[in-house]
Image (tube, helix red, strand yellow):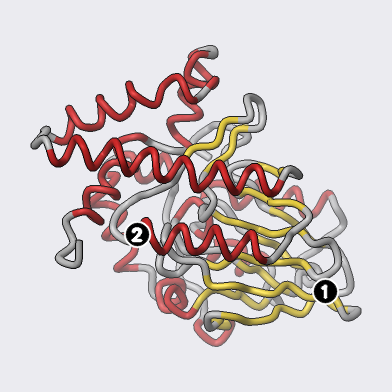
Amino acid sequence: MAGYSGITAGYLILGDRPCLVETGTSTSAPVVRDALSSLGVGPDDLATVVVTHIHLDHAGGVGDIAAYYPSAEIVVHEKGARHLADPSRLMASAKMVWGDKLDVLFGALTPTDAARIRALGDTGTIDLGGGRTLASHYSPGHAKHHVGLLDSLTGDLYVGDAAGVYLPETGDLRPATPPPDFDLDVALDSIALFSALTPQRLLFSHYGPVEDVPSILERSAEELRVWVDLTRRAHADGMEFDHAVAMVRDRTRERYAALRADDATAERFELLSEAASNVAGIIHWLDRPAR
């Protein structure tokens, strides 16, 4: 993504019905296609493509991947399905947020034939063949169209962004709280749900597998509370947005080894979980009438 490696992971589940979890951006779609080809998955072999949610770093390549693999069913939560069939509203919103950086970071999500899209409810099942399944579990808080996916054979849980973003080189974990859907209480409920599923591993879309499940989920919840507490204080003090971002970034800096590493690692970590986006999402939540 955006010229970096190790930003967004796609996971191929091999078996009787091969399944791709996450496509990444549209600009990454040719890379994903070539990787699948190297693993022996041809144009007619992929049975399913499933995304944890429709943000462009996870699902921006759906249209391209659907074209590469014409037999694959596309699976997404029902609140995101229409945006894969007609991405015009999603792309317009992304353009407002990212401006000229949109093409470099994500590219364009192309439409997928609605007949190929299966919309999941709050729970659902994806057939991997041979009695093996992916069970989907609605997990909003990061996004209202977010699901976690539990592999019945391995116990792997694909967590999308609901547990934050993880940098394997340093072991850092940072929240992902972008507008407009972030909700602290709902996000904490999603983390509690993940814990109750007792997965063997967490497979982060950003980035990679983690085996210390209880500790990581505890940290996920702690990170959310820290960022919300600091942002709430800045907001209550009437800080301008840029000053609030600077304060939260400064107060959390010592929590993350990546920000004390080389410039490339720090830049990659900020791209994974941008402080300004996190603070904006928390402020948006704080300003809701119910708050």
Name the residue: 68% across, 51% down: 203
Mark 1 neighbour density, 10 Å: few (under 14) some (14–19) many (20 or more): some
Name the residue: 38% across, 45% down: 103
Under mark 2, the amino acid is Asp
Q: Which quarter shows the C terminus?
A: bottom left
Answer whether residue 117 is visible to the viewer in this image. Answer: no
User: How far is mark 2 from mark 1, CA to CA?
Assistant: 35 Å
Name the residue: 68% across, 48% down: 214
Q: Nearer the viewer, residue 12 or 41?
A: 12
- Among the two numbered marks 2 and 1 on one chain, the one whose residue lies closer to the N terminus: 1
- Lateral position of residue 198 relative to residue 207, left or right: right
Looking at the picture, does residue 259 appear above or below residue 236? above
Image location of residue 235, percent across then percent down: 16, 40
Q: Nearer the viewer, residue 30 or 214?
A: 214
Q: What residue is shown with label 1? A: 17
| Element carrying mark 1 | loop
Number of on-image labels: 2
Q: Are marks 2 and 1 in contact (CB under 8 Å)?
A: no
Image location of residue 13, percent across then percent down: 79, 61
Looking at the picture, does residue 224 appear above or below residue 54? above
- Lateral position of residue 244 relative to residue 155, left or right: left
Under mark 1, the amino acid is Arg
2 vs 1, front mark: 2
- Residue 184 location, quadrant: bottom left
Name the residue: 76% across, 44% down: 211
- Lateral position of residue 168 relative to residue 27, left or right: right
- Residue 215 location, quadrant: top right
Image location of residue 7, percent across then percent down: 57, 38
Q: Which mark is residue 29?
A: none
| Element carrying mark 2 | loop
Q: What residue is shown with label 2? A: 183
